[in-house]
Amino acid sequence: NAGVTQTPKFRVLKTGQSMTLLCAQDMNHEYMYWYRQDPGMGLRLIHYSVGEGTTAKGEVPDGYNVSRLKKQNFLLGLESAAPSQTSVYFCASSLGIGELFFGEGSRLTVL
Amino acid sequence: AQSVTQLGSHVSVSEGALVLLRCNYSSSVPPYLFWYVQYPNQGLQLLLKYTSAATLVKGINGFEAEFKKSETSFHLTKPSAHMSDAAEYFCAVTLRGGTSYGKLTFGQGTILTVHP
């Protein structure tokens, strides 16, 4: 009964370091999304994917890259972390009709 | 483009009192609308959704919302608050049709506090 699983759940980085967040879903959903959540700003879409091998930019894509090599996985990368990227990151998947299934989040702190 | 505005970043009610969380949307075409709930240190869970069937939508945990096109609103209500309802609530909108790819635009969130 896994649903959407994110790893790691917590990470602390220094400015300029790189890292990758992994999202895995076991519901055979075509669509996957990465959001960031910041206090008072709700959730903002970073990147999304409409199927294996596809990616597209969302509302706040700068400083992030993504890949969807396998249908069940969606990776979010930070090549050179900045303090402004301190946030809680949520992965979600869906069938494309709006009901998103979310992971439990990954809390990233950039010092 | 679509957007959502949640009126009130914090709402406080007494246990047993009516819960009313306000959401107004802006959309160039008929939207789908959602309410999600987030408990501390967890992801978001779907409470209810409006997808153009009945305008009064019932969700989990006794919540319901009414789609009012004339007012561009989708307010969330519950007749009697319970301590376990304390959480953050998000209203979200997406456009109908294939080009939306299910992407949701979220409001800023409303933190609900329930006092004994």
Image (cartoon, coloured by chain):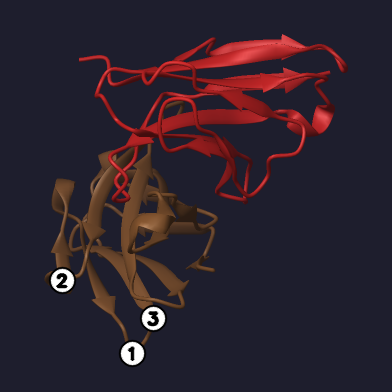
Q: Can you say whether B52 is above or below A46 in the image? A: below
Q: Are marks 3 and 1 in contact (CB under 8 Å)?
A: yes
Q: Earlier in the sequence, mark 3 or mark 2?
A: 2
Chain of the residue displaying label 1: B
**At numbered mark 1, what does the secondary structure look like: helix, strand or loop?**
loop
Who's red, chain-wise? Answer: A
Residue at x-position 32% and y-position 45%: A96
Chain of the residue displaying label 2: B
The outermost residue toward the front is A53
Gap between marks 3 and 2, in whole Å?
Answer: 14 Å
Residue located beneath label 1 in the image: B70
The outermost residue toward the right is A16
Rendered colour, chain B: brown
Q: Position of residue A52 (x, y in %)?
A: 42, 25
Residue located beneath label 3 in the image: B72
What amino acid is found at the position of numbered circle 1 in the picture?
A: Ser
What amino acid is found at the position of numbered circle 2 in the picture?
A: Leu
Dot 2: few (<14), some (14–19), or many (≥20) neighbours within 10 Å?
some
Using residue B105 as the reference point, say whether residue B47 is left or right of it: left
Q: Are marks 2 and 1 in contact (CB under 8 Å)?
A: no
Residue located beneath label 2 in the image: B56
Using residue A50 as the reference point, say whether residue B18 is left or right of it: left
B51 and A10: which is toward the camera: B51
Gap between marks 2 and 1, in whole Å?
Answer: 14 Å
